[in-house]
Amino acid sequence: MASGNYRIESNQPLAGRLWPLPGAQDYLFNDRSLAVAMAAKSLTSPSGQEIRVVHVPSGEIVFRKAAAVRGQASDDL
């Protein structure tokens, strides 16, 4: 496993145009800003699952992209 201070992880495979190896469930980065930016631009396959950035040494979640929740149509239109 490669070395990195920040891990982007999800329960489902990560997808996106910026990933070198689409389909992995975690990636390591040395830079927090880059890890958060990549997580924010990423999707999961199947879509809608949570994506997290974890500070590896402490285990602290520093960014969380919540799972998509399908809302119900509102009658207040």
Image (spheres, grey):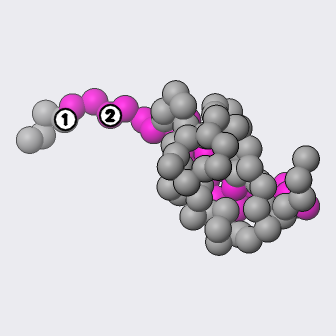
Q: Are marks 2 and 1 in contact (CB under 8 Å)?
A: yes
Relative vertical location of residue 12 with respect to residue 39 in this rendering, above or below? above
Q: Position of residue 77 (x, y in %)?
A: 8, 41
Left or right of 37: which side holds 10?
A: right
Camera-side residue of 60 and 15:
15
Identify the element where label 1 is drawn. Answer: loop
Magenta residues (range): 49-73
Q: Residue at x 64, y 49 (%)?
A: 20
Whether residue 77 can be seen here:
yes
Residue denoted by label 1: 74
Left or right of 26: which side holds 68?
A: left
Q: Position of residue 46 (x, y in %)?
A: 52, 27
Camera-side residue of 65 and 2:
2
Q: Residue at x 74, y 71 (%)?
A: 31
Q: Residue at x 21, y 31 (%)?
A: 73
Residue denoted by label 2: 71
**Residue furthest out toward the left:** 77
